[in-house]
Image (cartoon, helix red, strand yellow):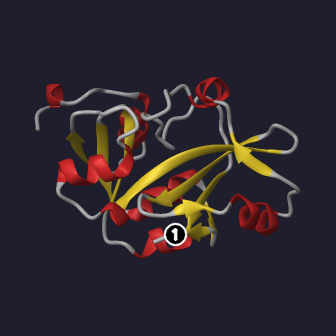
Amino acid sequence: MSKTDYPITTAVRFLRGHNIPFTPHLYPYVEHGGTAHSAECLGVPEHQVVKTIVLQNEHKQGMIVLMHGDKQISTRNLARELGMKHIEPADPKQANKWTGYLVGGTSPFGTKTALPVYVERTIRDLDLIYINGGKRGFLVAVAPQALDTLNAQDVNVATGS
């Protein structure tokens, strides 16, 4: 792809600024299509598509959790692992305020506010991950080592098949 074939988002600027190699992938965004839709469009396993979820704790402090597309986050286990009382999804308006991204286009790279990032530890075992590039219908393929630039802490909170 040439430079004009994909959007230059804050996430793309972050990746370039940190010299992280990435491959851009555009696909037709579908409201509530989720990672199943994007994986199907790209022809990759949904397990390799990583979703970026903005959550908040009982003090209304935000955090980002990166999870396999085919798994869910156990917020109860996450709270226990982090020594917090309660964790729940952030309101979409609040998530947008913290990250600068719309729900469905949230990237962990280049967020407006530096939020703590937690990554399901098995994501690091993959050769390549597909993660949001900062716009709906836009994923970037990167090595999981790219998450090191986020100071992401490993957690073990996946549920589901």
Does residue 15 appear left or right of residue 100 in this picture? left
Q: Residue at x 15, y 29 (%)?
A: 5
Which quadrant of the rendered structure holds the N terminus? Answer: top left
Q: Residue at x 65, y 32 (%)?
A: 113
The answer to whether residue 22 shows anywhere in this view is: no
Residue 133 in the image: state x and y as whole percent: 36, 39
Residue 47 placement: quadrant: bottom left
Q: Does residue 156 lie above or below 5 as drawn?
A: below
Q: Residue at x 77, y 51 (%)?
A: 87
The crowding category of the residue bearing disc 1, from other C-alpha atoms within 10 Å (few below 14, some 14 to 19, many at least 20), is: few
Q: Does residue 131 lie above or below 161 as drawn?
A: above
Q: Nearer the viewer, residue 17 or 105?
A: 105
Residue 129 in the image: state x and y as whole percent: 34, 60
The answer to whether residue 161 shows anywhere in this view is: yes
Q: Nearer the viewer, residue 31 or 117?
A: 31
Q: Does residue 39 lie above or below 138 as drawn?
A: below
What kind of residue is marked 1? Gly
Does residue 107 appear left or right of residue 135 in this picture? right
Q: Residue at label 1?
A: 160
Q: Nearer the viewer, residue 95 or 126?
A: 95
Does residue 72 appear left or right of residue 33 in this picture? right
Which quadrant of the rendered structure holds the C terminus? Answer: bottom left
Does residue 106 appear left or right of residue 137 in this picture? right
Residue 48 in the image: state x and y as whole percent: 34, 63
Residue 49 placement: quadrant: bottom left
- Give the tally of numbered discs: 1
Residue 140 in the image: state x and y as whole percent: 30, 46
| Element marked by disc 1 | loop
